[in-house]
Amino acid sequence: MELRWRYRFAAVGGSTAIVVFAIAIANTATVQNFITSLPVLSKLQPVVIQNDEIPDEMVTAVVILLAVLWPLFKPRPRRILDTISLTHKRLFFACALLATIGYFDWSTRLPRTTLIATTVLLSVFLPIWFVHIRRRPQTPSRAIIVGDDPAVMRRLHEAADTPILGFVAPSSVDVDLRGEPLADGGILRARQPTLPRLGGLSQLDEVLVKHDVDTVLLGFEKPDRAEFFGTLSACYDHGVHAKVHRNHADSVLVADAAGGDLVSTDLEPWDWQDHLVKRLFDLTFASVALLLTSPLLILIALAIKLDSPGPILYSQQRTAEFGETFTVYKFRSMVTDAEAEVGATLSSEDVGETDPRVTRVGRILRRTHLDEIPQLWSILVGDMNVVGPRPERPELDRDIESNVSEWRSRWFVKPGLTGLAQINGVTGHEPERKLRYDIEYIRKQSFWFDMKIVVRQNYSVLVDVCKLVGIFDED
């Protein structure tokens, strides 16, 4: 929580100061003369940048170094050797970029002698700084138990390897969580008082802040949306670790299955920095796509109205992150009220194009995926990402859950317009295969992985459009 921001400020601020300091030292006449006195560098001429020029060179170097060192600004526990290795890899890549600027002889370039001296200084001081501020793996020290099942909560308390501050449970749940026996010379003398009730589930946010909780142990009878995933959402918002008992880990996204009876849930598959980059991409993609397709939107709306009576758009509830719901919009591709005939176990988007309820315009929209364009609005307002597990209808989710126990693991990331399952042609008709692709995406997700999926999806759409107009054969 607060330590994360402290680390980021220290990492960025310290790196900036070290880069400025290194360039200032490298720009002195003493260092320049020493560099050119070395046998392998004797052909270089010492160059001392003038005071009125050095700010531009420093700004350029700082911007490039900070951009390349970006992964090191993420608050992650790392070993000393890993920290040094990652720092050197990133540093030498940044220096190569600075050398490229020097090759083109731009006005903001660093002289070769200055760049060499700066690289040497940074290769020493940057690793020292990141080793100094690195986040070491720590055992959480402020944990609480949250749940509604006394038996599960007692099991968590017995398995906990860290002090428990208290528990949060509905007022209707009566649970007696005794502390550990007190020892006096190896003889058990008494028992600690019962762990205090810190509040009800509706007060969880206040409890997390008031007691500066860093770990929550989840003790629910069933991982239902309203309570279990509501608790997960609160933990995610406050940057709190969430753990479950190994016997109840089949409905969550587990970060690490190794260890004892308690396993951690992966509440934040995306780091804050990666999430920011992903969100900026989503906003740019949705805005540009809506702008470019705006003339087409008018034509589609007109075609729908002329083809069949009814609204242009249709809306539907879909499952969002942590089991919540949101409204998704699509261009209507079926006759009015056709959704009522589809049934609770089948999504209308899974209905074939030959279904008699699909309109003539609707068949074209479905084959070209143009009916999905209004979902760009859901991306703009933050209900969806461009890439992520495809959201299903809540009633369909409930039906699938009864047969696929790990289905809820998909809810640990925001749903997407397209995803790994979609580009591989897997739909809700094959829930187990779809789940495998979705979990694979969650594990591998990165900005560049998203780019690959978007490129493949766009290529697929282009092929479908070409087939429709007869450029490609159906085969």
Image (spheres, rainbow, N blue to C red):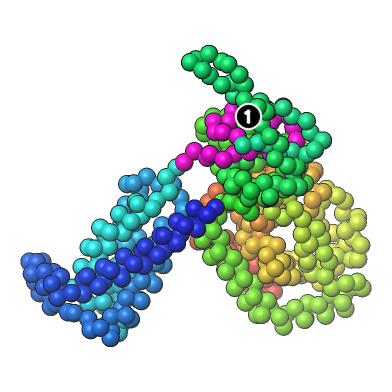
Q: Name the residue located 80 percent from the left edge and 38 percent from the top edge.
A: 171
Q: Is residue 436 above or below residue 464?
A: above
Q: Quadrant of the C terminus?
A: bottom right
Where 96 sits versus 414, above or below?
below
Q: Quadrant of residue 154?
A: top right
**304, 142: nearer the viewer:** 142
Work out whether residue 435 can be spotted.
no
Task: Look at the image and tell me whether residue 419 can be seen.
Answer: yes
Residue 276, horizontal then vertical, whole percent: 55, 64
**Residue 436 locus on image (x, y percent):** 62, 45
**Viewer-side residue, 33 vs 265:** 33
Q: Any magenta on residue 385?
A: no
Relative vertical location of residue 138 with respect to residue 452 in this rendering, above or below: above
Residue at 47% x, 57% y is: 6
Q: Which residues are magenta?
A: 138-164
Quarter-of-image position of residue 390: bottom right
The question of residue 139 being in magenta is answered with yes
Q: Is residue 93 left or right of residue 206?
A: left
Q: Is residue 151 shown above or below 4?
A: above
The location of residue 302, given as percent across then percent down, is 83, 80
Q: As rendered, which of 133 and 101 lies closer to the eye? A: 133
- For the point 75% across and 53% down, the residue is 324
Label 1 crowd (10 A; few <14 / some 14-19 / many >=20): many
Circle 1 SS class: helix
User: Which residue occupies the foreground of this view, 376 or 235?
Assistant: 235
Q: Which residue is mark 1?
A: 157
In x, y percent, where is residue 327? 78, 62
User: Label 1 is placed on what type of residue?
Assistant: His
